[in-house]
Image (spheres, helix red, strand yellow):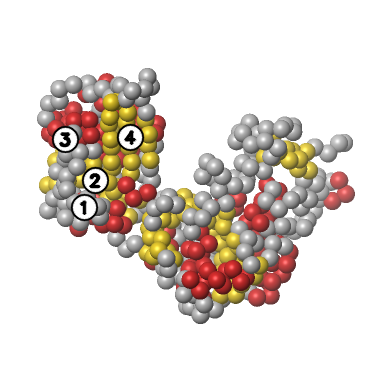
Amino acid sequence: MAKSSTYTCSACGAAHKKWAGRCETCGEWNSITEEAALSAGPKGKTLGAAKGHRVELSELSSQDAPLVRSHFGIDELDRVLGGGLVPASAILVGGDPGIGKSTLLLQAAGAFARKGKKVLYVSGEEAASQIRMRAGRLNLTDAPVQLAAETNLRDILTTLDSERPDLVIIDSIQTMWADHVGSAPGSVSQVRAAAHELTSFAKRRGISVILVGHVTKDGQIAGPRVIEHMVDTVLYFEGERGHQFRILRAVKNRFGPADEIGVFEMTSGGLQQVVNPSALFLSERDKPTSGSVVFAGIEGTRPVLVEVQALVASSPLATPRRTVVGWDSGRLAMILAVLEARCGISFGGMDVYLNIAGGIKISEPAADLAVAAALISARQDHALPADSVVFGEISLSGALRPISQLENRLKEAEKLGFSSAYAPSRMKTIAKSDIDVHKVDDLEEFIENCFGRLDD
């Protein structure tokens, strides 16, 4: 019987039935490579016919020793991980080139090593001397971190087996090379094999491993998606290169809440923690401005106040622009449609620009009302009071839907000096608060309370 083969795109990991010059999924050229199918088993037998070793079974009621988390000493990183590093865990960290992944992990390695932990930092992209140069800039030269510049996976695993560190950092997984895989480093087969070997080794030996992954043009970690399923935690390091703020976001975490964020500020001495991100994101709000609204959001378990900025201007184009930074463009189109259909407020013939200040990305539906308020404020050139926050989800009928964690949002707003809030009326009662909460049923009522009757 002829051996079957599969064809995989090295850029996005998509599988194809046959070779083609261009991947239909991601559009890359000459990225599809052939992969031999897995062997059927010893002497041509199927897996069911070939005898293996019996798997050890256990009961759900079995008692295991509790896992004790280890703290890095970097509170924002410990928060994102769910309270610290779990032993024998595998973590994947992705982000754009030059965003600061290596800087963050070298600082984390230094802080962890200073707590008496054994840390190995393995780089496949830099020489050891280059890492020492960056460590000097970060004031980490006295940290007892052991360095290695190697890409051969077999040699790395042999070293880890003899050294038995508490934590190993692999920078990056795309540079690792397994000699039993017949393809070039960085290919789908190599990345998948290297991630599997390192993750399995971490579980067997009780060593925590952090893998650094490059991202594609779409912002996804390069390589097959199966890597994200192998590891316990997936973190994304986000931010604009020209902006000093960086967001570390957990998109998957088996040992803690997903969508938790940690906020850092890039300085000449490395990444510094931002203890109160709400105050930092709102630091430039000195007076009421049309098109500017404060949204009280929740990222993971943390309440965060951010500024939603909108600009509406007459458009000379037949198709007006709709530009969005930090929010979903599809949801903006929905809000504009609801405003026109349910409230009679048209944005036809107008360019609309929407921005979430501070470089943070918001995906929470509770931001709908704040976005609508910013759009109307910019269109009417009417500023909302500077001491008010807005939150609520808008349905297609124009009604406001209740949201979660109202009390946490109000506490964060009260801590930063806000005295009023606009929220959906169908919310659960909360403990007494000094903030005056204006509850509204639908979008029309909110517009009338904040802006009065509008003449189109």
- Pointer 2: residues within 10 angstroms few (<14), some, or many (20+)? many
Q: Amino acid at mark 3?
A: His
Q: In percent of the image, x 69 and y 75: which residue is there? A: 162
**Numbered disc in front, either 2 or 4:** 4
Kindly identify which residue carries mark 2. Answer: 294
Picture quadrant where residue 396 is located? top left
Instruction: Left or right? Give the position of 153 relative to 326.
Output: right
Q: Are marks 4 and 3 in contact (CB under 8 Å)?
A: no
Q: Amino acid at mark 1?
A: Ala
Q: In percent of the image, x 74 and y 51: which residue is there? A: 184
Q: Which sits earlier in the primary sequence, circle 3 or circle 1?
A: 3
- Pointer 1: residues within 10 angstroms few (<14), some, or many (20+)? many
- Residue 16 picture location, percent across and down: 69, 34
Q: Which sits earlier in the primary sequence, circle 2 or circle 4?
A: 2
**Numbered disc in front, either 4 or 1:** 4
Q: CA distance from mark 2 to mark 4?
A: 16 Å
Kindly identify which residue carries mark 3. Answer: 382
Q: Amino acid at mark 4?
A: Tyr
Q: CA distance from mark 4 to mark 3?
A: 17 Å
Q: Are marks 1 and 2 in contact (CB under 8 Å)?
A: yes
Return the residue found at the far front: 316
Q: In percent of the image, x 28 and y 26: which residue is there? A: 314
Picture quadrant where residue 441 is located? top left
Q: Quadrant of the N terminus?
A: top right
Residue 116 seen anywhere in this rendered image of the structure: no
- Residue 130 picture location, percent across and down: 59, 68
Q: CA distance from mark 4 to mark 1?
A: 26 Å
Q: CA distance from mark 3 to mark 2?
A: 15 Å
- Pointer 3: residues within 10 angstroms few (<14), some, or many (20+)? some
Q: In percent of the image, x 14 and y 32: which residue is there? A: 451
Q: Secondary structure at mark 4?
A: strand
